Image (cartoon, helix red, strand yellow):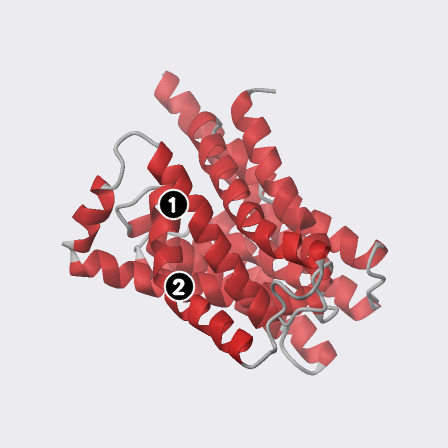
Amino acid sequence: MNKGLLYGLGAYAIWGLLPLYWRALDTVPPLEILAHRIVWALLITISLVALRRGGWAWLWAALRKPLTILAFVLSSLLLSANWWIYIWGVNNGHVVETSLGYFINPLVNVLLGVIFLRERLRPGQALAVLVAVCGVLYLTVQLGTPPWIALSLAFSFAFYALLRKTASLGSLDGLTLETMLMALPALGYLLFLESQGRGAFPHAGLTTNLLLIGSGVITAAPLLLFAAGARRATLTSMGFLQYIAPSVQFALGLTVFGEPLSLQRLIGFILVWSALVIYTLEGTIQGTRAARARAA
């Protein structure tokens, strides 16, 4: 296995195991966990940028472009919403549904690419999206309500990816700017909690304090591993790896956290999984054909 796949595997494994980390902080309110995640991630990213060649030239260039700043304000709002929904879902007993959101996400990415980037939807992709929509509709009818947590996670991250796809900054620079934009309100919220005597840090005990500090590392590390893997591995390989995280989350929800899985929910999941199989096979076939065409 080459380094790119190892980096990618590491990134998705960490994302898959995140429910264990957030559940260990379930005594802290989700919004407070989010604020700590932002502040400590900012310290990590600033340190990494400071140690890197080139320094802060990218930031001064970005600040001179109002449209770039606006794009990253929007992406930071989407990312913080995604993080909060995920933490809330995990710590309120919805790990299985959060995994559904990340199973759906690749298909939402395809849909947004068609709508906003005018990408052409191939027949296999269209079938995959249609089957996934059927799965979501089935869950909505059977459960009496749409899977809001899953849909919110899938669409918030898909719109975030769309903005980042069109942005001019790399992974580390972009995350640094996003955490900078989110840090002021996050820090203000933490200071407000402290002034009210309701802040967890640094009063909650050594383990909780260390976990809150470590939320910055657990945020930055998989993103950097993913960026390193994407540069070294093929898109097809990374495409297969992306299902590791929600699969691990799904397994954790059923086994470690003991969440129920009714027959109705299972059928909905099977429809979504079938859509992913169609999507993955179609992408693999198209990639093979393109490689043969280039070779010819």
The residue lying at 16 percent from left, 55 percent from top is 65
**174, 2: nearer the viewer:** 174
* Residue kind at label 2, given as amino acid type: Met
The residue lying at 32 percent from left, 64 percent from top is 73
Q: Say whether residue 263 is left or right of residue 245.
A: right
Which quadrant of the structure image shows residue 180? Answer: bottom left
Residue 52 position (above or below residue 2)? below
- On the image, the x and y values in percent for residue 193 come to 54, 76
- On the image, the x and y values in percent for residue 125 come to 49, 50
Q: Secondary structure at mark 2?
A: helix
Q: Say whether residue 288 is left or right of residue 60.
A: right
* Residue kind at label 1, given as amino acid type: Ile
* Residue with the most extreme top position: 296
- On the image, the x and y values in percent for residue 79 come to 45, 61
Residue 250 position (above or below residue 187)? above
The residue tagged 1 is 46
The residue tagged 2 is 182
Which quadrant of the structure image shows residue 257? Answer: bottom right
Residue 277 in sight: no
